[in-house]
Image (cartoon, rainbow, N blue to C red):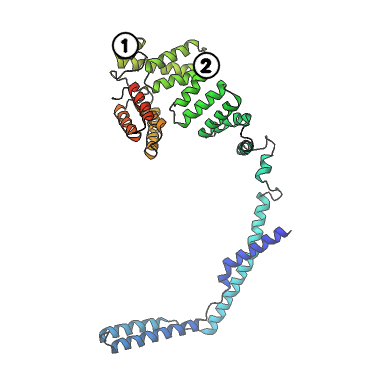
Amino acid sequence: MIFWILVAALSALVTFWITRPLLRAAPPAAASNAADVAVYKDQLAEIEADLARGQLSEAEAESARAEVSRRLIRLPDIDEPAKSESTSQERSSYRTIYTIATVAVPVFALVIYLAYGTPGMPGAPLAERLATAPDKATPADLVAKVEARLRAAPNDGKGWDVIAPVYASLGRFDDAVEAYANAIRLLGETPKRLEGMAIADIRGANGIVSKKARAALERAKELAPDSTEPRLWLAYAKEQDGDIAGAIADYKALLAKAPEDAAWRAPVTERLKQLEAQASGSSGKPAAQADTSPTASGDGKASSGSQPESAVAALPAEQRAMIDQMVARLAGRLKENGNDLEGWLKLMRALKVLGRDAEATTALSDARKQFAGDSKALEAIDGLAKSLGLGS
């Protein structure tokens, strides 16, 4: 009951504050006219004084007097009794409006609230929401519940294992990588955890397969040799490195063991055809001979003497544009923070794969300048440059 009394009082106070100008008495018209007349008389006196001091000529003074006189003539005639009666009626109607508004606004708000609101719903603090039954909780509540438990028990491997894929589905890829890493540290390696961590890292890096992701995929492949997911990503990583022959070999090995009804068989077959066409066109020989041609190094990677087209050149225009945008975002991030060695390596590799050799060489030069004096970083940069065939 006290709540509703306070609501009513607050509504009345707000209504009064908004409508209080309606309750103010207007100044009598006669008093207003008298004030105007006094002002105009003062102006006439100032004109005469300026004329006497020589600040105004006679013609200027006459013009000023005429203007003030016109203003004085325009003042309305006042019928004070009639005006007073009209003002009284207006004030009476204003009071009526104020009274109606004071009553109607709270009543109208109450009716709307009772019709569409839930006045009987109790408060729901975060702690109580987290204790809600899982079938009634929202995804955000469940995530918050697990996060709260992990803050209290950071060594709860099961909690990290549960929340990692949730982070990935929400687009929180950095959090997902950290959660998978904690689950692996506390519960041990499994192909599922390693693949999850690698894919989250790849998606967080705009599709670039980093060194960390490769290591996780290689380990997942060791633990589950027949698993398809890590082998597909590792073949894609070879494409990024410009190792078209290696990617073709991996895709063929996957297709040789793939069931006929595998969902991924059709897209991989199509991708294989594109790569074979590229390899044949860039080397002048059939794709099957690409790994033994003079233009390829002993490990199957393109040497500096060969200039293979980009591994994504045959993709549809929309996909190519998307890849270009991801690379542009990576380049922009490196301009803001050039201390990311892994980022520079990703950029060089991506530009080379896209066939943008001149930009890849520029990125190589910029990376060397950024890490001048850091022998370890320069070693990594030069090693990648050599494998990609980017200058000396």
364 relative to 265 in the view: left or right: left
User: Residue at label 2?
Assistant: 222
15 relative to 263 in the view: left or right: right
177 relative to 347 in the view: left or right: right
Q: Nearer the viewer, residue 275 or 88?
A: 275
Residue 380, visible in the rendered structure:
yes
Residue ranking furthest to the bottom: 52
The quarter of the picture where the C terminus appears is: top left
Q: Nearer the viewer, residue 138 or 304?
A: 304
Q: Residue at x 52, y 84 (%)?
A: 80
Mark 2 vs mark 1: which is more N-terminal? 2
219 relative to 55 in the view: left or right: right
Q: Position of residue 212 (x, y in %)?
A: 47, 26
Q: Residue at x 68, y 61 (%)?
A: 6
Does the residue at mark 2 contact the one at mark 1 (Cβ under 8 Å)? no
Q: Position of residue 371 (x, y in %)?
A: 35, 33
Q: Nearer the viewer, residue 32 or 267?
A: 267
Type of residue at label 1? Ser
Type of residue at label 2? Glu
Image height of 214 relative to 57, above or below: above
User: Residue at label 1?
Assistant: 293
Quarter of the image where one finds residue 296: top left
Image height of 118 relative to 259, above or below: below
Q: Secondary structure at mark 2?
A: helix
Q: Nearer the viewer, residue 105 or 184?
A: 184
Q: CA distance from mark 2 to mark 1?
A: 31 Å
Image height of 132 relative to 346, above or below: below
Other residues around mark 2 within 10 Å, as few (<14) / some (14–19) / many (≥20): few
Q: Say the numbered circle drawn on residue 310.
A: none
